[in-house]
Amino acid sequence: MNIDWEKILLSSAFLLNVQIGLSQKFVREIIPIFKNITIEQGLTNNEIRQIVQDKTGFIWLATGSGINRYDGYSIQDFAPPVTDGNGLERLSWRPMNLIIDRFNRYFLGSDFAGLQMYDPHTNQLTHFTRSNSLLPHDGISSMATDWNGNIWIATNEGLCRFDPASKTIDRPVCPDHRINRLAIAVDSTVWIAPAAHGLFRFKEDTINACESLTMLTIRDIFIISSDSLLLATDSGAFLYTVRSDIIHPLFIDKPSHAFSSIYLDRYKNIWAGTYAHGLLYQNSSEKQSYQFRHETGNNQSIVSDKIACLFEDRQGNMWIGSYGDGVSIVSTNLHQVKVRYQKNRTSNGGNSISQIIKSSQGDVWYHNNRKLVQIVESEIEDRAYQITSPLNCQGDIRVISGFENGLLLATTCGLFKWSPSKPDLLIPALLNFPQLPQNQILSLNYQYPELYVGTTINGSSEGLWIVNPYKETIQQFRAEDKPGSIKGNQVTTALRGTNGDLWVVPGRI
């Protein structure tokens, strides 16, 4: 079963309502919408310590009460009745580490019960502990796979290497210390972060300390290349350059935090989880940092401030596991999600958007019945224009549409052409169509060469009007008791499809 996560997450998308004020400077920021999964959606435990994806697309979650499988719709507790040769035994109920190899075998590392290897093809479970193997300790803190398929295991008393083919464990010559994290590079270098402090590089039975990191307690390692690492530490997040042995602090515009996890996604954005202050994100293109915190009562915010692990699936979604609150999912392409809002939302009384359009020139406009606002991506401040109706008519803007080189404004005082190049000039429009009820316009849509005008219910003037200002033709369509007529006279939207079909949305039937 191959899973299309893009379709699944799009089907779970939320409509984000944003209120915007129009008199102050506007602020642009990223406010992502997180999809959250907890025990209410079927997790067996809200503690999520590791997340992996198998070759068929399923997401596997290592929880405080076993492993769960997510297919995009529901959670399944994966607890097959397995045997270890001596009778039935459950898969580890507290797997802090999980690896699924290319043969679809499962390797579970517990923080107190050693290593389990489960082969679903034979339904055979093999359990390795300190008492029956060379496993240094039953407390496993980290696991990683090398290019030969061996599993490297970090424990409370040192490092070992497990060969799944022979089911044997050997212990390389390394200090017998508690290890927080290990990671393996493509050149077979094993990076080891002891629980105390520092970082060690192990290759070809030789171990070397990284001198500039001797005072740091490292919690997570992400390998960018043979010369670059991302490090999550108790003192901050860093980029480490191997050859020069230099560290560069990250998120310098944010307060210092103790970090639990770090990740570089496919867009080169940096994600870093903290133990108590949420998730930090640095955009690769703008080099701007953002911090996402859990908001009580907001189920679209990140599920927790206590981040345990990070994982990007093959479809480009970031999975964020937490210490006891569940898991969040969000697209890694966060730079496509932006919100513009006014800091002072109470001023001017214009804190809502009535309509938003894209003009024929590609500009984005919105209005709040009194002001027109143009969004300019290259500017921090949006351009606001106060519209004053002619002849002292106290007319509000009802709807707008792109039109020729500017906009067409339907107001309670009539229909006008307007351009930002001459913002104080309103030109009465379509005066050669006296039958068009200009004061009762509900919708406008200009698709050259026609203008589609929906009007409110008002006797003989109601329905849909199609105007061609260049041929000077006009047609009216009303709801009638005959085939081919529209199904309502209060037309809220009308547009012409690419194949020539006319689509009409009636507001009342």
Image (cartoon, rainbow, N blue to C red):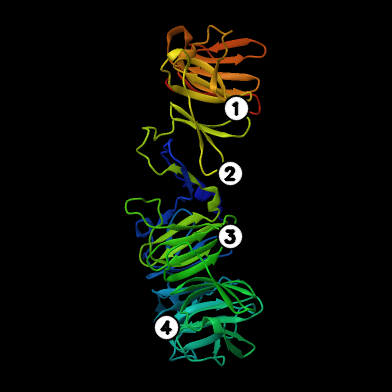
Q: How far apart are the two marked residues, 3 and 2, measured between alpha carbons?
A: 32 Å
Q: How far apart are the two marked residues, 2 and 1, measured between alpha carbons?
A: 18 Å
Give SS at disc 3: loop
Q: How many other residues sit within 10 Å of disc 4, few (<14), some (14-19) or many (≥20)?
A: many
Q: Which residue is mark 2?
A: 378
Position in image of residue 60 (x %, y %): 48, 65
Along the line of sight, the residue nearer the viewer: 371 or 199: 371
Which-is-in-front pick, marks 3 and 2? 2
Badges 3 and 2: C-beta atoms under 8 Å apart?
no
Residue at image position (53%, 87%) is: 160
Residue type for callout 3? Arg
Q: Residue 139: which numbered mark, if any?
A: 4
Q: How far apart are the two marked residues, 4 and 1, measured between alpha carbons?
A: 70 Å
Q: How far apart are the two marked residues, 1 and 3, measured between alpha carbons?
A: 47 Å
Residue type for callout 2? Ser
Which-is-in-front pick, marks 2 and 1? 1
Position in image of residue 219 (x %, y %): 46, 75
Q: Residue 314: which numbered mark, if any?
A: 3
Q: How many other residues sit within 10 Å of disc 2, few (<14), some (14-19) or many (≥20)?
A: few
Q: Residue 421: which numbered mark, if any?
A: 1
